Every structure is written in structure tokens, then in C-alpha cells.
Image (cartoon, coloured by chain):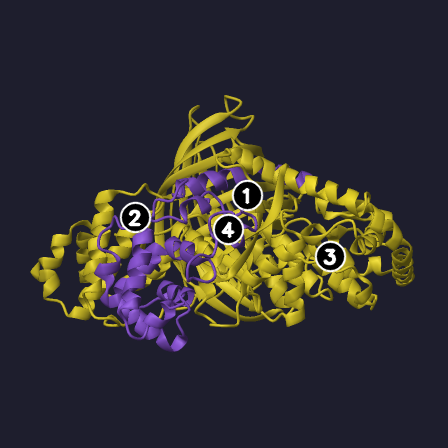
Amino acid sequence: MMPILIIRCSLLIILTASISIAQAGENKVIADLQMAAQKQRIWQSAVWINLLHYDGKGDLADNYESEVNDRRFFIAPDGKTNPESELFATLAAFYKTDVTGDEHAQCKFIARLNWLKQKLSFDTGSLPVVHCDKYIEWRKHVRSDSVTLIFPAYNLNSPSSMFGHTLLRLDSAEDEGNSLWLSTAINFGADVAAGENSILYAFKGLVGGYSGMFVTDHYYKKIQEYNRIEHRDIWEYKLNLTVGETERIVTHLWELQDMNFDYYYFDENCSYRLLELLEVARPEVDLTAEFKVTAVPVDTVRAIENADMIESAVYRPSQSTFLLHLLNQVPEESHDLVIELSKDMSVARQDAFTSLPENQQSIIVDIAYQYLRHQQTNKVRDPVIAKRSHQLLLLLNSYSKGLAETAPIDIPVSPEQGHGSKRLTLGLGKRLGNNYAELGLKMSFHDLEDNEKGFFRGAQINIINLQIRTEENEGVSLYKLDLIDIFSLTPRTRFFKPLAWKIYTGFERQLTNGVDQLTTHVTGGAGGSWSLLKNSQVYALAIGRLEYNKQLRRAIEPAIGFTAGLLQYFGPTTAHLDFSGEQFTDGIYRLRASYIQNIVISTNHSIKLSAKYEWQEVDEFSDVQLSYQYYF
Amino acid sequence: MKRMLAGLVLLSGSSVAMASAGGDGCGWGNALFAGQNGTGPHVLAATTNNTFGNNTFGMTFGTNGCSTTGKLSYGGKNAVAAIMNEFSEDVARGEGDALNTVAVLYGVEPTDRDTFASVMHENFAVLFPSEDVTADEMIASIEDVMKADSTLARYLES
């Protein structure tokens, strides 16, 4: 930074004399432009508001504030809070002659300049000539003939990744399809210091404290990061932006280089900022309005889809998805060979292997290699395993090219075609002998029984799930409020041994010692899940629970318990049978059986039947409910 | 607006923690070759939204070593080094995106890419003589192999 400052200072001194002469003529031009801008009130134009990331509305410029948190982004001293004065200052800055080259406003704010030139149709000949070397150099590297929205979807065993992430990719028209790895990825993220504690990350991500920034990188790094390290499939949506719209994104991106925004995990996040970029590209669409409170990435994809901006979708399966696909290509009997070969190269010389046809051999070697590498994800390089990996590649290479023709991978339903993230429930039921009506609202995201289209089976994550009931002879009361509810059930196989786990916390009604009242709890557990048949899975987990309940002896009473059940997918309906129970340290126990069946009517509508029976030392009771679910 | 989010701290805490339990950790252990460079420090494993302060637009400026060097366009040799793992797998098979990407980096015309793939496939053991080969050695071998091929040699002439 210092050298630049020094140069600018010395230039100032040298140029002072010439500026004073030129100023009279320039001032007139600037004043005319400013007057024209004022007359047309162009500071209120959506383009200007978008380019400066102002939030606000109305005719008064004071009612606006930019979400960019960086003085360097504004030319006027009050630019952050006054779109009009920033506009005037920007016009004046374009005519400055005491700054040259890359530091000149003409080089720093190219999208603003392009738009103002067009909007005020002014004579560009009147502008001082400035050479933007850095920008020109940058543009040489950033090929941008089309724009693709990138959505790394969920990790099978990490429901928290369900929220996903979005980024943009700038592609070159040349070599379509073959140079995508070299395309430019545009990512908005929090600037987190390396090694920062994850709890602190979560906290600051929620309440503020991080700066967010746009970052560009080669797309192959994103493939490596998502497809290979995090085992997430990637969806790539080619957008139908015109050349001019794409140009606005790229020039505006240049303006945003190194600029700090506030970063919030839930609303002002990666996906929200990308929507803003798309609004800069196409000012007539309003994509951000519905995401002022939360911006769940898949919902933003849906918004872009609804704005008719998506041309086509491409599926890029993760390494583990592809591995599973390959495993389905070889007979079950060969799975032993795959595992053995991944552990011991000498298996390749055994009859069991050499007696197979060559194409089968080559697939088995390929799978064994990938399986071995998959197990090494995020582990420190082990020389012995590296050696075996290399030997497997050598062996794979010994088969002729194209020998192992495998069937193309089935493309799943893309995530944006799934049900909406929020859910409204209207139910009627009977609990403890009392009839009730229930109103439920879930802020996000997916239950095990919800319509599986576009989601992974066995992955539940809910945030803020509220159930309010009104009972006969009683008023309205809170029945349940789950703050977080994650239940991850990825089936164990011979190749992958994921842990099934659960964590949920919040408030819920519990009948204890004959008293029905609201309790507070944290419940979590771990175990396993297995897929016995194609469309069913079973699970069993050990559970631990801490409960605040006035009927229990301690203020916070611990319990141990279990949950086990069966999920059956019938296509348009999913059934879930569960047995669970907990034993508290003060002797109280609860045992329950529940059955839920969700019948899908259409993507965003379903009917749910739930029946629960609970046994305790003094009581036993049922809760039966029929409800309608609307997802939005 | 922000206040409603405060209640969700635990969620995110768990999501980060669980992500770790699911096996992200920090670091980049998936490298097969001892001599691979170019990727490690650039990829932050923990979460998807993180960035690097000094790498915002750096890929194009050479500030992180990704300058265009030699005959290669785009990200240059560094890109080849960065996708060394994927490239080795594709060379072993004789096809794939990484193989195509390297061909593009060398400016190989679409009509010659099959030749490029075949020649690389036939020379796997030359390119990757051991698991300890370095990226620079691999690049030198790619170029030697190309020079020795009548179709591919022209892509290395200046």
C-alpha cells in the first residue's frame, strides 16, 4: 500500500499546475452531467442502487445505506449512506486528472462508468485518457462468454451441508466443455483467519463480525474441494445471460475486488450476494427481495429458475457417488476382490482375479484404486498407501484404453425441483383424550418422511420447527419448538461405514408424573443404519438426553435411551416406524412407539398421518393426528 | 432481523463440529504424489464459505504463484501441478476431464486431443515412474513425450 501512496503524492505536486488550467472547462462538463443526472433522478435507478449495493427505498437519498463495508468503494465521503452524492462524486472522479492509471476511478469503477456513459449518453471524448493496465491484464485471464450457477449439493452423511452453497462460474465459449476446469469460479465467503475455532466461526457467522468478500479462483479447485474432499455432487446451471449482462457482472466484479461486505451465515451469505450480482446483470429482475431474512442456497437457485434465467443443468457427481455407481457395475461376488485388492496388490496375481474377463478386471482395479483413495480423504499422505495407489494405477494402465465401458450414471432429480424449504402444517388430532387443532411452521428444511424428490434419503435437518396446539377446554399453547433437529441415517455398506447420528434440541410437552407440561431438552445419539432392501432402511441408535422438567428430581435430569426404527420408501409415500425410550437417573422412564406415513400429493403438498403411543410407570396415552403439509 | 438468528448458534456449532466428525479435518491428505504442489495451501478444508485474504483475485496475478509460465496458457504449470492426481488417474485410464484440461493448457487442438490422450496413456510409466515423482518432473516428462510425437511436437515449438 505504501509505495502507491507515495507515488500518488509526488504526482499530485507535479500535476498541480496543469490541473488548475484544465479545471475550468472540465467543471462545466461535470456540472452539466450532474445536472442531467439530477434531473432524471438516475441515482434512484435500480442499476445504480444495485451497483452500489444500497439497501433502502423511497425518494429520499438519506434513506439508503450500502451493504458494502469499505471506504474504498465510495468516492463521496457520505457515499455509503447517500446514493445521490455518490453518483455526483463518481461523475466528477471520472474527470480527475490528478490521478492516473489503475488508481483512477475510470479503472476502478468500470461498471459504473459503462452504465453512466450509456445512461447520460455523454461524449466520452471529454474524459481524460486513462490506461487501466491491471484491469486489461485481468480480463485477459478471465474468460467470460457465459455464466453458470454452481450449486454443490449435499453430503450424504452431513445433513448440515444440506444448506449447500452457491457460486458462479465464468466460462469460455472456446473449447466448450473441455476447458471448464480452467473456468473462473466466483465465490463469496467470509474472511476467516486460518485455524479459527469453529464455534467462534459459527457465532460470528450468525451475529456478525466477519467480513465477506468475493474471491475468484480456478474451477478445478472447486471440483477438488466439493467432488473429491467433501464428497458433494455439484449441479451446474448454465444461465441465459446476454453478452451485455455478462459483461456487467465481470466489470462489477472488478469493482468489488477486495471490497468488504458484512457477512452473515443465514442472510447476507454467499447465495444472497450472488443474487445481487445477477441483479446487477439483469436489473429488471428482483431476486433478493424474498431473501432478506434467510437465504437458503437451494431456495435462491429456485428463485433464479423462477426468473427464467436457467438454460440447462449439468450434474457432476462426487467421487463417492461415482464410486457407488461403479460398484453397481460389477457383480456382488467381485466386491470381495475390490476390497482385497485395495489392501494387497498380490491379489491381482490370484486365480480369482486373473480368471475374470479383462474388462471386468480393469473395472475392479479402477474401483479398488478409487476406494483406496476415498479412504485417504483428508488424511496425511501415507507412503505405503501412496505406493500401492501408484501400483494400482500402473495396473489399470496396463489394460487398453476404453476397455471398461461402464453405463452412464443415472442423473438424480436436481435439488431445486424438491419441495420448498419452509413448511406450514394444519392438523387435527387427539392426545391424552383431548381433541386438538395444530398449526405448525417449519423455517427449514427436510424431514425423513418429507417428499424425497430432490433430497437424499435418510437425511433430516430442521431448523425452527414450531407446533402450536389449541385443545378443547383449553387455550392455545406451545406444544413443541425444535430449534435444531438433525437425524442422519446413511446406510452402512461393506465399503462405507458412516455413523448414524442425531441431535435435536428445543422445547416439547411431556407428560411426567401425570403432569403435562413444557420441558426443555437436548437430545443426541449415535448408532448405525442399514439398508436391507432397495427401498427400506433400518436404524438403531443409543441416545443421551438432558431434560429440564419440574417433575424430575434435578433441575437438569440426564437420561439414557435408544431409538430404533424402519423407513420404507414407497415412491409417493414414505412410512416411518420408530421405537424409542429413555430412562432418567431418578427412575422415571418413557417408552414410545410411533408410526408416521406421509402421502405426497404434489411437490409442495402432502398429507401426513401420525400415530404415537407412550408408556410410563403411571400413565399410558396416545396421540393420533392427521395433517396437511404445505411447503413453500 | 439479526436477532432471530442468535437462537441458532448451536445449529451452526453443531454443523461445523459434525462436518469435522464427518471427516474434513484440516489439511489436504488426498495427494497421491509426494512431489505435488500447487493445491495444498490454496484449499481450505473446513467449510465452504471461507476465503483467503491474500488470494481474493490472486489467481490471475501470480501473487500466489499461479503466474503464466512457459508455454502454458491459463493458469500455466501451476494448474497442471494442481491437478496432478486427477491427471495421473486419467492417464492411467486413457481418458477424462483432467487429461483434456492438460491438453487445453498445452493448446492442443480438439482434433489432436485423442492423440494426446493415447500418447499420454501409453507413457504412463514415463510420466509417473514412481509415487515420489514431482510435479516439475512430470511436466518435463509430458513435454519430452510430446516432443517425441510427430503430431504433438508442434505444440511445444515456439
- The CA span between labels 4 and 1 is 12 Å
Instruction: Farthest residue to the bottom: give it.
Output: B111
Of marks 3 and 1, the one in the foreground: 3
Q: Position of residue B107 (x, y in %)?
A: 42, 69
Horizontal relation, residue A602 to residue A574: left or right: right
> Seen from this angle, which residue lies furthest top?
A554
Can you give x and y, in whole percent of width and height, for residue A565 in the image? 38, 48
Q: Chain of mark 2?
A: A
Looking at the image, which is closer to me, A156 or A349?
Answer: A349
Above or below: residue A309 compared with residue A272 = below
Image coords of residue B42 (percent x, y): 46, 46
In this view, the mark in front (3 or 2): 3
Disc 2 residue crowd, few under 14, some 14–19, many 20+, Cα 10 Å: few
Tell me the amino acid under the disc marked 4.
Gly
Q: Are marks 2 and 1 in contact (CB under 8 Å)?
A: no
- Chain A on-screen colour: yellow
Chain rendered purple:
B
Task: Report the residue marked by disc 1.
Answer: B54
Label 2 to label 1, Cα distance in Å?
32 Å
Residue A390 point in image, percent of width and height = 23, 53
Q: Is residue A508 visible?
A: no
* Identity, as a three-letter code, of the amino acid under mark 1: Asn
Question: Which of the image's four quarters has the N terminus of chain B?
Answer: top right
Tell me how far mark 3 sits from mark 1, CA to CA.
24 Å
Q: Which residue is mark 2?
A: A375
**SS of the residue under disc 1:** helix
Q: Which mark is residue A617?
A: none
Front label number (2 vs 1): 1
**Between discs 3 and 2, the one toward the N terminus:** 3
Q: Which residue is mark 4?
A: B62
